[in-house]
Amino acid sequence: MRWAEERYGREYDLEIFMIVAVPDFNFGAMENKGLNIFNTTALLASPDTATDAAYDRVLRVVAHEYFHNWSGNRVTCREWFQLSLKEGFTVFRDSQFSGDLSSRAVKRVEDVQTLRLLQFPEDAGPLAHPVRPEQYSAINNFYSPTVYNKGAEVVRMMHTSLGERKFRRGTDQYFETFDGSAATTEDFVRCMEDASGTDLQQFRRWYTQSGTPELTVQESRFNGHVDLQIKQTCPPTPGQPIKKPFHVPVALGIVDSHGREVLGVEGRANGYRVELDTAIAHDNPNRDGTVVLSVTQPVSHVRFKGVPAGAAISFLRGFSAPVNVTYERTAETLTHLAVKDTDGFARCDAARTLFDLALADDEADTSTVLDLAATLVEQAKQAPDDGETKALICAALHVPSPLETLRLRKGTDIFAIRDRTNTLMRAMASRLRDDWRELVEANSPPGAYVHTKEASARRTLRATAMKFLRIGTPRSEVGELSDWLVRCLREADNLTDRSMALQQLIELEGIDDRGRRNLLEDLYREWKHEELVLLQWFRLQGACTRPGGLQRVERLRNHEGFKAENPNFARALYGGLILQDVSAYHDPSGAGYRYVADRTLDYDKENGHIASLLMTEMSKWNDIDSRRQELIVGELRRVRSLATSKEVIDKVDRSLENAPDAWG
């Protein structure tokens, strides 16, 4: 409440803030004037029943629903097509709030990872739709990553382009003008224009055009000058074969060989006098080392004069626009940015690009990324407990999942990606084995559990090190590691540490499976009275990547503790299978797709929303290799012939719109 008053000037207007916690709920929460309804997973938390991530989610969701009092209730939407007016704006504000209370850089990395994993594939597939849809068959299907997450990015771009002061003037005008009435996204943008004196006519295309724009950057250097050519395109999407250029705010900096800023106010403070030669409108809105370019043309050029030798371009800082970027840079440049960039997101993104290159094919050179991992681990050993540095290093050490890599290399055999990913992780685990052990020991819990950003960052680093320690343990030492993990599990005083140890025990190869199952059943009996703990118990097992995933999930589906009618249990168990267990879900026989289609039909009878949710990954069938595409399309057509809920029928119809008739 204080944050909303100070950051946006919005006071709460009632004498009481009433809440209800519901264990069986399709959504995380729902705002109502004076009475907010929360899923128990998004409201209840204690050290024994919530992980660090769950605590953070409670904080974010409660904030989100509270912020809706103004953006959703006092100012509401004219009709359903304007859904992102309240949801996109409010997601942006809850993201700001979470970042201010913990780490803006870490929060930004997390938000972009969600965007790339969930929204970009939606934009690239048959379910693509604009942030402001023009039509719908089942409105529940438009509570989507595009409306929420991309909608938040659209608001963020205005904030980036205008700067904090002008953006605040725009929101003040919006709330004051439309208080007590219904508004549109057009009204919101117009308030931003009026308050800032900025023309956002072209920017409005972000609301009406679907798809993820693609920026292709070419860099050339001569005599201390750096030239950038920036081309923008946007692939065709359903109903929109041709796209007009977007207004793309591109935030960039230049980092010298020592990791110091070269551009803007900070660059001048560091003794640099770099001149920008460009027709592109640009600004240094926050008076720091970042310049924001307003890229509006299909092809744009910018020249930086007087750039010091060895300096690197830090492109799309803070992920200033929801775009894909193709920018060929040397491994040396990317390593420099990954280690020394002052922008936390750009640093992690440079590391991610190096991982992507290492996973490109079997012949790719992995030596650079292994050297980078060693450097980052060394930094982690020296990192302060400031609640940010350790968490950012963990983010930079994140090896993209096979699903993340598949999105970049559509049509590739996902098993080949899985194998390359496992090989790289084993190499990282083996080369740095002693270092991982040292990080586990150095970041062990210093005392009783507290949920602070500093303690959470320590636990995140410990979990990362624990995973690589498990991967790198030779078979002869598996028993010793298993005993140690069991001790960690038993001695932990909180769910975060218990989950860390349990996840590695579940994934550990080479131990007696009967003993592992006995341990899991002991935990079930100990915690079955706590539904939130039980959900984590199912979630970790559903996401297990050891062989036999379908059989394991089916056994859990029939377990006495599984509440099939509860949406939280469905998301916990089946979500892990679909998004984590590549071997089971993408089995070449099609058994994984068939299993999920069967579960979809089960829920179709009682809960069309959850049934539709289970089909989301299948809707991205055009990402996968052609052999699996045919299997998925066959299952989609089977579901379509038997489904009765409006949500499932709508999603399947849109998913199959361009599928070959010969399949299925």
Image (cartoon, rainbow, N blue to C red):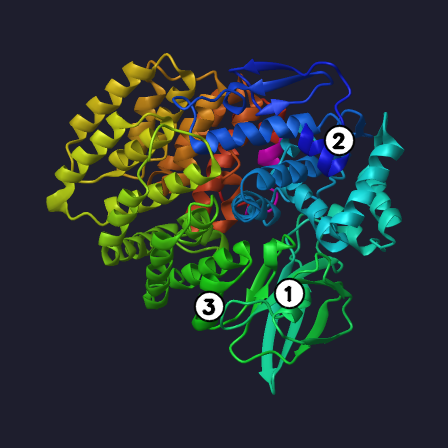
Q: Amino acid at mark 3?
A: His
Q: CA distance from mark 1 to mark 2?
A: 36 Å
The answer to whether 476 is drawn above or below residue 325 in the figure is above
Tell me the residue that label 1 is attached to.
266
Q: Residues within 10 Å of mark 2 (few under 14, many from 20)?
A: many
Instruction: Examine the rendering and report whether any part of residue 217 can be seen.
Output: yes
Instruction: Examine the rendering and report whether any part of residue 548 can be seen.
Output: no
* Region of the chain picked out in magenta, as a range: 650-660
Q: Amino acid at mark 1?
A: Glu
Tell me the residue that label 3 is attached to.
336
Q: Is residue 539 magenta?
A: no
Q: CA distance from mark 1 to mark 3?
A: 19 Å
Quarter where residue 245 is shown: bottom right
Q: Is residue 368 left or right of residue 166?
A: left
Q: In this rendered view, identify the residue nearer to me: 306 or 183.
A: 306
Q: CA distance from mark 2 to mark 3?
A: 42 Å
Q: Is residue 142 left or right of residue 361?
A: right
